[in-house]
Amino acid sequence: MVLGKIEVAKDTYLVGIGVSPGISIGEINLLNRNTTVDDWPITADEVDAELERFHWALEQSRDELLEIKQKVSSKPHLREHLYILDTHLLILEDEMLVQGTERAIREQISCEGALKRTLQQLRQMFDKIEDEYLRERRSDVDAVGGRIMRILTGENQRSIDDIGPRALVVAHDLSPADTLQMDRDRVLGFITDKGGKTSHTAILARSLEIPAIVGLETITSLVYDRLPAIIDGSSGVVILNPSEETFKEYLKRKQSYRYLQKELHGFKDLPAITTDNVRVALRGNCELVSEFPVARNHGAEGVGLYRTEFLYLGRSEPPSEAEQFAAYREILEEMQPHPVTIRTLDIGGDKVVSQLNVADEANPAMGLRAIRFSLREGKLFKIQLRAILRASVYGNVRIMFPMISGVAELRTCKRILREVQEELDQEGFRYAPVIEVGIMVETPSAVLLAPFLAEEVDFFSVGTNDLIQYCLAVDRGNEYVAYLYEPMHPAILRALEAVCRAANDAGISVGLCGEMAGDPLYALVLLGLGFHELSMNPASIPRVKRILRKVSRRDGERLLTTLLRLKTAKEVSACLDKEMRKCLPGIFDQVLI
Ligand code: PEP
Ligand code: MG
């Protein structure tokens, strides 16, 4: 196969960042490339005409965005993403973008050159931002800049609407606006030169369940329309021009993936009940309002962790009480009669919300994050609690405080909650008479104080993502010490055991909502530890359920006793792997796909 002078060899393998799982086999539909833009000097006489051309391009871009917004508004499941289009409309009016380009035009640079220069300056500013999430908002500015540039150069953007069937959409950088318009029946997957795991587009791909790979750097320069290709969104592998053999191999993989998904889907309405009749509640972790129906569809018995900080990220103002109330009401109604555990704002650490101005801290993971931030920003905390309480009459809500480190802190939270209830009483607002209140157990001090904390809450939810980081003193995002981040470290097993014992002695519910909960490898040991509830990425629910329905708590307890005798994480992991294979011959390998 030939692209200009470039030949795409059979079975050309490329590896990017898989951000949304699944295998798609189809044809490349190239949406746009990384085009180089010519710029040239202009004369003083031409300045006014170039300024006019620039403003015309801004107007055209605005019209295009408004048209997309209108289309998206008619699709209720995409409604919550409209703010992305609003962000793009705001960027079009941004002073730095508009005045920067105008200034360069006045310095006698062509409109294209002036825009290119301004975008470069903006990009450099974004590159200096340390926070990954905010840095990736640069892609929104790039998307808007790309739109204006395309209009200026007269290049035809292929519309998502013109895309053929079985399309693997390839783009230099797919804007969230493009992603939102994708027709799930025609678009089988997408691949981009740019992007990272937390870019808006990646988040949307996961919530729309479209396999996607980003960060391939130069894919747009290697492909052309109708080129056959395969993408594996789980491993991040793209195969261009697959040979007959590869094609058959991936067809088989896709089929087994599909069979497995289908088989697992069969577990959707079955309870997670062990062979000795122990029932474990499997719930979903959700970040976006649109994920709640997805969680339900995967058989989630409620939501064990709703990360509300996603309502605050990527916008210029914190969400109002009314906006939060509407979101909480919608999700509570969606998940009825199951519980929705709303975790109060957990920002700080690696999740920075620009407009809330978290202080510049030397050690953010141990700084003003999670509940510490809420207790300092009392007004914001109360607004969130008011919204949760007001929504509570529409379903089964549980309130959860993150990163609690001691009894006094918990009591302060509960006092503020009571104050908010009194305020609502005075104002005549209703709220549910009984609401469970719990905490995330994710600090070593909360583990050590678990018996005391258990006396004052209705439930515990262990956040192992942080508990491992704080117990083992290993930054969860630092690749240099990633080898020390071991869920099966003997110290972690003991910490989990202590928390479960404290909760069971006090007669309160204990769950786990860190990433460990969704890994089938740990299902049996978590059962043995005595967890009543596991909350995970919704797609993992059927896999974990399948394991739990085949084993007994006694098996889990026996396994735990064996593991607790071992002294290193390596020994524990090796023993766990061996025991799981022995206990679940055949099944265990399958659910790991
Ligand atoms: C955790 O720490 O395990 C957790 C679930 O919370 P987050 O990943 O949002 O910190
Ligand atoms: Mg946490």
Image (spheres, helix red, strand yellow):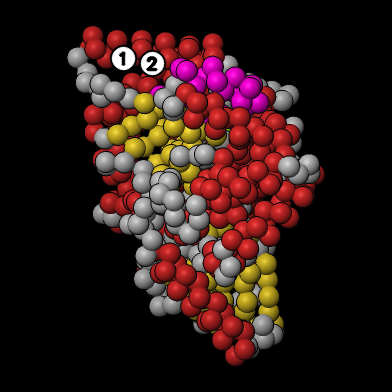
Q: Is residue 556 left or right of residue 281?
A: right
Q: Position of residue 291 (x, y in %)?
A: 40, 49
Work out whether 567 lies above or below 256.
Answer: above
Is residue 118 found left or right of 324 in the rendered image?
A: right
Is residue 112 or residue 179 the one in the foreground? 179
Q: Residues within 10 Å of mark 2 (few under 14, many from 20)?
A: some
Residue 418: image x %, image y %? 36, 12
Residue 255 vs 464, above or below: the answer is below
Pick the quarter of the image with the N terminus.
bottom right
Picture quarter with the C terminus: bottom right
Residue extending farthest to the left is 428
Magenta span: 437-456
Query: Cβ–Cβ below 8 Å for labels 1 and 2?
Result: yes
Residue 557 placement (x, y as % from top left): 58, 45
Q: Which residue is at a point 50% across and 75% down the rendered structure image?
A: 256
Q: In which quarter of the view is residue 230 placed?
A: bottom right
Relative depth, front residue between 551 and 263: 551
Whether residue 128 is visible to the viewer of this picture, yes or no, is no
Q: Amino acid at mark 2?
A: Leu
Image location (x, y in percent) of residue 120? 66, 47
Left or right side of 18 for 271: left
Asked whether the viewer can see residue 491, the reply is yes
Q: Amino acid at mark 1?
A: Gln
Answer above or below: position of 393 versus 90: above
Circle 2 SS class? helix
- Residue highlighted by disc 1: 421
Residue 448 within the magenta-colored segment of the rendering:
yes
Which residue is at 54% across, 32% downward? 500
Residue at x 60% of width, y 54% of height? 521
User: 550 or 122, which lies in front?
Assistant: 550
Label 2 belongs to which residue? 417
